[in-house]
Image (cartoon, helix red, strand yellow):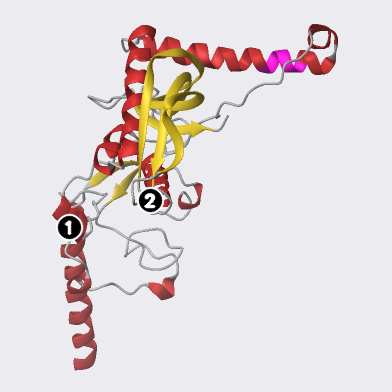
Amino acid sequence: MALNRLQAVRHLNQAVKILQFSHSFRSSECYSTLVFTDSKCWSNSSCAFLQNALPWNNKFPQGFYRSIAYCATNGSCGLPWTFRDPDERQLMRASTLPNFNCMRSVTTQAKAPPQARQMGALKVSMLSPGIVYEPYAPREPMPFWKRWFTRNGWKRTKEDIILELKSAYAISKLRKYGYSKKKFYNEAIDLYKEINTQMANGDKGLLRKTVTENMYSALKNEIKQRGTVWSHVNWELVEPVLKIRTLRARLIGVDRNDLSKVFIQLTLEFLTKQKFEAYDSNGGVVAGDKYKEVLVRDIWVFEKSLFHPGAYWRLCGRIKV
């Protein structure tokens, strides 16, 4: 008899605790609106989906996420006290539940790595693409009859038109940034003379400012190899330049989401007269003649960023003739 009374008091005590716990549980519920894009979680989540989705997202159901509830068993998808199996009706003690906070955001931000926190915001900026995009190559001349009366000629004409249209588009884009053909040619001639002089003197410090990073590595190796053969050289440009013309213009985009972030490359042909003479370690002439003018044809590629403030033209490549 005493045992039955003890069990009845115990059951009554458990029922009071359940009521108190469920009341505090409901009073601390916090709902957050979520949109679930993964169809796998639709049938396995403890969320109440709405029948009418938002007009801007009709593809996925919308639900309210209980930030303080979770499924106690796999597949139950309900609150801890709503088990479908009678054998699983075991209540969890309040002390074993986590400390819930209604004001906590559903999505938490991951902490940045220690190095990133020390460095702060890291801004990556590309100074040069490092390549010559669609390098110029001389086209073999084609007779008139073959160009207009053969299939290969039509194909060749189509390719030539596409190449010219690309250059025209790049130039038209460049004009929006104040491009002037005469002004650019004068600047290109000055760069041509300056870079050749720096190469002849072996001035790597100044050379770094007038060429791109990849081009600087190539020219630095040339200076090093030349030093093993010649002690120093004398170079002179005979002005004015005989001929300068634009062979190709290309745009290189670096961000698909922002079409204004582009580099432009202009391929120029220089036809000049130069004087050259090389000396050994004793000062003797081993190559060239500083009194003799030599006709030289060079094809250089100049590059400039259209989105970096204060960007200027630099040499990014040379094409062998």
Residue 154: quarter of image: top right
- Badge 1: how crowded within 10 Å, few (<14), some, or many (20+)? few
Residue 71: quarter of image: bottom left
> Which of label 1 and label 2 is nearer to you?
2
* Rendered view: 140 above or below 35: above
Residue 1 visible: no
- Give coordinates of residue 262: x percent, y percent: 39, 26
Is there a contact, CB below 8 Å, between mark 1 and mark 2? no
Residue 66 visible: yes
Q: Amino acid at mark 2?
A: Gly
Q: SS class of the residue under badge 2?
A: helix
Mark sitting on residue 23: 1
Q: SS class of the residue under badge 1?
A: helix
Q: Which residue appears at 36% of the width and 19% of the height?
A: 189
Q: Which residue appears at 35% of the width and 11% of the height?
A: 179
Front in this rendered view, residue 235 or 66 = 235
* Rendered view: 124 above or below 157: below
**Is 300 included in the stretch rendered in magenta?**
no
Q: Tell me the magenta residue range.
A: 155-159
- Give coordinates of residue 261: x percent, y percent: 36, 26
Front in this rendered view, residue 296 or 45 = 296
Q: Amino acid at mark 1?
A: His
**Main SS, magenta residues:** helix
Left of 151 or right of it: where is 21?
left
Front in this rendered view, residue 310 or 139 = 139
* Rendered view: 146 above or below 198: above
- Give coordinates of residue 42: x percent, y percent: 46, 48
Left of 292 or right of it: where is 90?
left
Left of 190 or right of it: where is 244?
right
Front in this rendered view, residue 8 or 301 = 301
Residue under circle 2?
A: 227
